[in-house]
């Protein structure tokens, strides 16, 4: 019960510790009522200021002026009851009210100007500088679009005062002005200290990350744009006070080709449609959403279900109509109030924007919304070459498609899609209506060919069973038309199509029509049906020798031989042992025979395309067996032959295999170059069947080996996005790629980026069972990342989820101990001590069964440190108890099995004990423990020199500062400085030398 002033003050402190949001706001309103029951001006003022802050950061800015009016009445009657903090806040919050009034269209402009005058007069009377007043004048000018540059200069030229906005917020205001002036480059230069994290505040750099997204895109600084989105959105997500920033992140997704991500953000933040207390922020949010939704409508996705205001089902079309109606009306209200058209003009300018990139910017995070959009970018990539024209005449269209198909030209797919469209729309008449001499075969033949194309499409999307079924259907249709050779080729393809997806290769296999696979072999897969393949060969030979001329074309015969070579390649890859063991002779012999037959037949028939595929099979097997030079030479020959034959569209797979071979041989620099050549060639020829994801993944690995972290991050982000486009079949590959990406980001000290990536991996974890080690690793990495970001509560929750998952494991049981120990520390740092002690007890119990001495000792040492930090001398007894537990854990572990790092565990406990004694003013005991730590570190050799130097620093502080033995402390430091320099530890030497000089003073 809040029946005393102290109780209300305690409740105010507790509420101040809560995150901003509805709970804090409602509680603040209740505490104002509670404070009003007491005749205490200071208490009532504190309660009102807390309520005003809650409104400010919960999207209820429009309510702030009424609350502040009550504060001013209290100030006017009893200013002496305001403490130092509250007094400062009275003047600070004039700015909040000015922002609230300006952002509410129902407040007349004259009232806004009067408030500015009130602010100016109050500041002058109190002796405060007027720079904050001129800042508000500038914000007004920028809002209404009049005299903006003059107002900017009047503000920017004045010196900052104690009531100025923080440096980071002022940088944001200046940079935003430059963006409105059209100078993105200057804006980003101005933003540099904020975006780099040098200048921060409660909201920065996160708000600037949102505002800088489009300038970064327009300047081509895509890596920074990606990072700003990942880091900034995590902070803004779900926060009603940052509704404007959420809208900017949604707009960024629309303009960077990440519409599915934009829809996912919209779904996560649909409650923000209910935030009405900040009309200006709401207008910006609605407009950002409209940019996304309008783009989807233009792309023909009007019927797509999307998230909108709760309580109604929405499609793109219905939500767009709703957004336009409300946002247009809101903008019009602002312009009517302002007497200018600036607000509406800015809104129209945003809505006129179109995607800024030809290809989607790979963000590295998975978007589960609207998978049909993820498969095909709303803005398709345009091949950088002249595309094959589409003949208007249907017969000419079919004949040209067949010619291109025979060459394996990627434009054949586009022509066949057009054939399918016309045949579906116009029916059989489009075939039978032509004169006999012009007819492109029979209707049945065309149906068979279209079934064949459907098979290829299914195989491209890795639906192996559907692909095989369509090939068998095509074979039956060809047979009915008397095309025995085409029927045989289709049925033989069906025999091997199901082998592609069993793990012996990746999409680079291209099935029986493409090059050799490039992935590592794994699994067993279905057995090759050699009896059927032998029968197919016999049938091919029979048709080739038919009286009256061959009944199958050369290419159909080569298809049969290629299917056999592919099957033999598949079988050998699965059987290959690790070098230097010899592969099984049966599979080696069969592969040699089938590939040789295929190569010789292709050469005899002059088919460069088929001949180079045979070479790629051989090169792939050579590379897998460690014969890299042989593989590379073969692949370079393939590339040269294809270029010479005028068929460069077949080179991407050869380049991809060559890049993989070079990577395998440790030639990372050349591998990166070759892999990018593969990607460029595939993009140039718009080869949708090319394994972009796997190639980007290899390029990422190669770049990481070279230390080019930026290139590696770009490549892995792209790889993850490409795996997403392949649908559920590639979900595991996408998740594994993101784990690698997150690890790389963490290594590069971009922990916030890594956490965003890991959160997207775990979006699919709801369906994960105990055996899902991939998700377990992701959750562990996420928990540690959140810990590094000081988000201890969220970190602890991830650790606890992981602990629940581990309960179902029967292997790696030591992880239970480690996770319990790390969870205990996170809980303690989150100030959830009851749960922390429970986790500590679990960790100690688990240590008895599944020892993890290092993490458990670290947990106990951290507990000791936190206790004395929070309780001072009163926590010493508890801290010493934790350290005694740490010693006992180490001793038990040493009795069971000698610990390689026992010296570190022993020394670290002495070090923490020294710190604890020093906090409790027991300096002699503290110095003794510090000396014991220094001695214990000696056992660690050179790798212990850095922690030993820290122990010396602590001992010198205690000895020289607390015990007054300055000379002894300086001698100790001099010896340590020389020792550090002898080991090349210059930074440690400088720290110790600086302390020595300070003690001398």
Image (tube, rainbow, N blue to C red):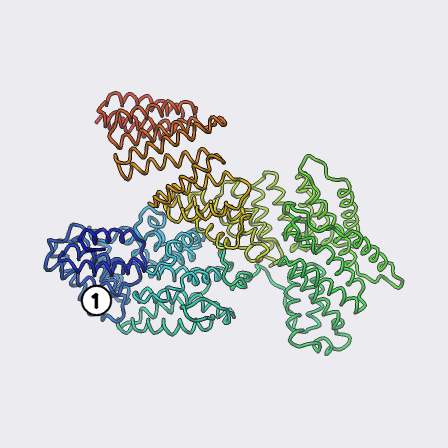
Q: Is residue 464 visible?
A: yes
Residue at the extreme right of the image, as rendered: 547
Quadrant assignment, res 208? bottom left
Q: Is residue 319 left or right of residue 408?
A: left
**Quadrant location of the C terminus?**
top left
**Quadrant location of the N terminus?**
bottom left
Q: Position of residue 430 (x, y in %)?
A: 69, 76
Quadrant assignment, res 671? top right
Q: Is residue 702 left or right of residue 627?
A: left
Residue tagged 1: 112
Q: Residue at x 65, y 45 (%)?
A: 521
Q: Position of residue 476 (x, y in %)?
A: 76, 66
> Badge 1: how crowded within 10 Å, few (<14), some, or many (20+)?
many
Q: Position of residue 761 (x, y in %)?
A: 49, 52
Q: Which residue is at the front of the view, 261 or 228?
A: 261
Label 1: state its secondary structure. Answer: helix
The answer to whether 928 is drawn above or below residue 119 in the figure is above
Q: Which residue is at the front of the view, 237 or 792?
A: 792
The answer to whether 760 is drawn above or below residue 664 in the figure is below
Q: Which residue is at the front of the view, 323 or 197?
A: 323
Q: Which residue is at the front of the view, 915 or 594?
A: 915
Q: Is residue 377 left or right of residue 434?
A: left
Q: Residue at x 54, y 64 (%)?
A: 372
Query: How many discs mark residues in the rendered view?
Result: 1
The answer to whether 85 is drawn above or below residue 118 in the figure is above
Q: Is residue 712 visible?
A: no
Q: Position of residue 416 (x, y in %)?
A: 66, 67
């Amino acid at each position: 019960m809040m029946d005393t002033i102290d109780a209300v003050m305690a409740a105010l402190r507790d509420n101040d510790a809560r995150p901003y949001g509805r709970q804090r706001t409602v509680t603040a309103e209740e505490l104002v009522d509670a404070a009003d029951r007491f005749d205490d001006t200071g208490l009532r003022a504190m309660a009102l200021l807390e309520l005003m802050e809650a409104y400010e950061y919960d999207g209820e800015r429009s309510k702030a002026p009424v609350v502040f009016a009550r504060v001013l009445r209290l100030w006017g009657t009893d200013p002496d009851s305001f403490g130092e903090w509250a007094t400062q806040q009275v003047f600070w919050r004039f700015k909040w009210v000015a922002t609230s009034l300006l952002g509410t269209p129902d407040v007349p402009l004259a009232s806004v100007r009067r408030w500015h005058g009130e602010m100016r007069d109050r500041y002058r009377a109190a002796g405060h500088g007027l720079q904050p007043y001129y800042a508000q004048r500038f914000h007004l000018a920028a809002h209404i679009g009049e005299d903006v540059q003059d107002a900017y200069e009047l503000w920017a030229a004045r010196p900052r005062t104690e009531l100025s906005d923080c440096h980071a917020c002022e940088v944001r205001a200046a940079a935003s002005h430059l963006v409105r002036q059209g100078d993105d480059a200057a804006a980003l230069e101005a933003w540099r200290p904020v975006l780099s994290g040098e200048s921060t505040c409660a909201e920065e750099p996160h708000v600037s990350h949102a505002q800088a997204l489009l300038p970064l895109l327009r300047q081509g600084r895509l890596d920074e744009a990606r990072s700003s989105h990942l880091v900034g959105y995590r902070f803004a997500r779900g926060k009603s006070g940052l509704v404007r920033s959420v809208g900017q992140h949604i707009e960024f997704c629309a303009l960077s080709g990440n519409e599915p991500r934009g829809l996912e953000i919209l779904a996560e933040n649909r409650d923000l449609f209910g935030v009405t207390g900040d009309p200006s922020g709401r207008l910006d949010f609605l407009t950002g959403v409209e940019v996304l939704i309008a783009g989807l409508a233009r792309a023909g996705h009007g019927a797509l279900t999307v998230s909108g205001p709760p309580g109604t089902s929405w499609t793109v079309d219905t939500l767009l109509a709703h957004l336009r109606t409300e946002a247009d009306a809101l903008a019009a209200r602002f312009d009517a109030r302002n007497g200018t058209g600036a607000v509406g003009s800015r809104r129209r300018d945003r809505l006129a924007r179109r995607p800024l990139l030809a290809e989607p910017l790979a963000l590295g995070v998975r978007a589960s919304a609207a998978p049909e959009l993820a498969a095909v970018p709303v803005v398709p990539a345009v091949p950088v070459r002249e595309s094959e024209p589409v003949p208007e005449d249907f017969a000419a269209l079919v004949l040209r498609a067949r010619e291109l198909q025979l060459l394996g030209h990627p434009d054949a797919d586009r022509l066949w899609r057009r054939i399918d469209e016309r045949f579906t729309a116009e029916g059989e008449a489009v075939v039978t209506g032509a004169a006999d001499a012009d007819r492109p075969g029979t209707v049945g033949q065309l149906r068979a060919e279209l079934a064949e194309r459907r098979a290829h499409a299914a195989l491209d999307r890795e639906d192996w069973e559907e692909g095989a079924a369509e090939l068998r259907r095509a074979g039956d249709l060809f047979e009915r038309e008397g095309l025995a050779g085409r029927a045989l080729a289709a049925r033989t393809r069906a025999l091997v199509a199901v082998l592609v997806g069993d793990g012996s290769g990746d999409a680079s296999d291209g099935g029986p029509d493409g090059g050799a696979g490039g992935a590592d072999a794994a699994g067993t897969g279905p057995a090759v049906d050699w009896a059927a393949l032998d029968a197919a060969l016999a049938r091919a030979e029979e048709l080739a020798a038919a009286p009256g001329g061959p009944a199958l074309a050369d290419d159909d015969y080569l298809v049969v031989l290629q299917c056999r070579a592919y099957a033999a390649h598949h079988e050998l890859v699965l059987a290959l042992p690790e070098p230097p063991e010899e592969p099984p002779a049966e599979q080696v012999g069969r592969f040699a025979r089938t590939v040789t037959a295929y190569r010789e037949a292709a050469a005899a028939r002059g088919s460069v395309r088929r001949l180079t595929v045979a070479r790629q099979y051989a090169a792939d097997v050579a590379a897998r067996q460690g014969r890299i030079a042989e593989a590379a030479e073969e692949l370079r020959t393939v590339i040269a032959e294809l270029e010479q034959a005028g068929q460069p569209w077949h080179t991407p797979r050869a380049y991809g295999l060559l890049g993989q071979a070079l990577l395998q041989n440790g030639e990372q620099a050349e591998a990166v170059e070759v892999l990018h050549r593969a990607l460029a060639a595939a993009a140039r020829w718009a080869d949708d069947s090319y394994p972009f994801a796997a190639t980007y993944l290899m390029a990422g690995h190669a770049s990481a080996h070279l230390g080019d972290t930026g290139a590696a991050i770009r490549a892995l982000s792209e790889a993850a996005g490409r795996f997403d486009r392949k649908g559920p079949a590639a979900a595991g590959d996408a998740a594994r790629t993101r784990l690698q990406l997150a690890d790389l980001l963490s290594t590069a000290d971009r922990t916030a980026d890594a956490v965003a990536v890991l959160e997207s991996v775990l979006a699919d974890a709801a369906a994960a069972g105990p055996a899902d080690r991939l998700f377990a690793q992701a959750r562990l990495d996420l928990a540690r990342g959140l810990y590094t970001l000081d988000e201890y509560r969220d970190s602890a929750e991830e650790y606890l989820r992981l602990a629940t998952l581990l309960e179902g494991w029967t292997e790696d049981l030591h992880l239970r101990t480690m996770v319990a120990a790390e969870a205990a520390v996170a809980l303690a740092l989150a100030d959830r001590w009851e749960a922390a002690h429970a986790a500590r007890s679990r960790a100690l119990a688990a240590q008895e069964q599944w020892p993890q001495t290092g993490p458990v000792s670290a947990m106990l040492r951290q507990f000791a440190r936190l206790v004395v930090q929070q309780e001072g001398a009163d926590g010493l007894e508890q801290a010493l108890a934790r350290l005694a537990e740490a010693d006992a854990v180490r001793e038990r572990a040493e009795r069971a099995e000698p610990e390689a790092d026992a010296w570190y565990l022993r020394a670290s406990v002495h070090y923490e004990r020294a710190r604890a004694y020093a906090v409790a003013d027991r300096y002699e005991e503290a110095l003794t423990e510090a000396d014991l730590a220094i001695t214990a570190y000696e056992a660690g050799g050179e790798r212990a020199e850095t922690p030993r130097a820290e122990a010396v620093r602590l001992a010198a502080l205690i000895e020289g500062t607390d015990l007054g033995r300055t000379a002894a402390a300086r001698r100790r430091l001099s010896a340590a400085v020389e020792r550090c320099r002898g080991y090349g530890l210059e930074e440690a030497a400088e720290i110790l030398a600086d302390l020595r000089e300070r003690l001398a003073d």
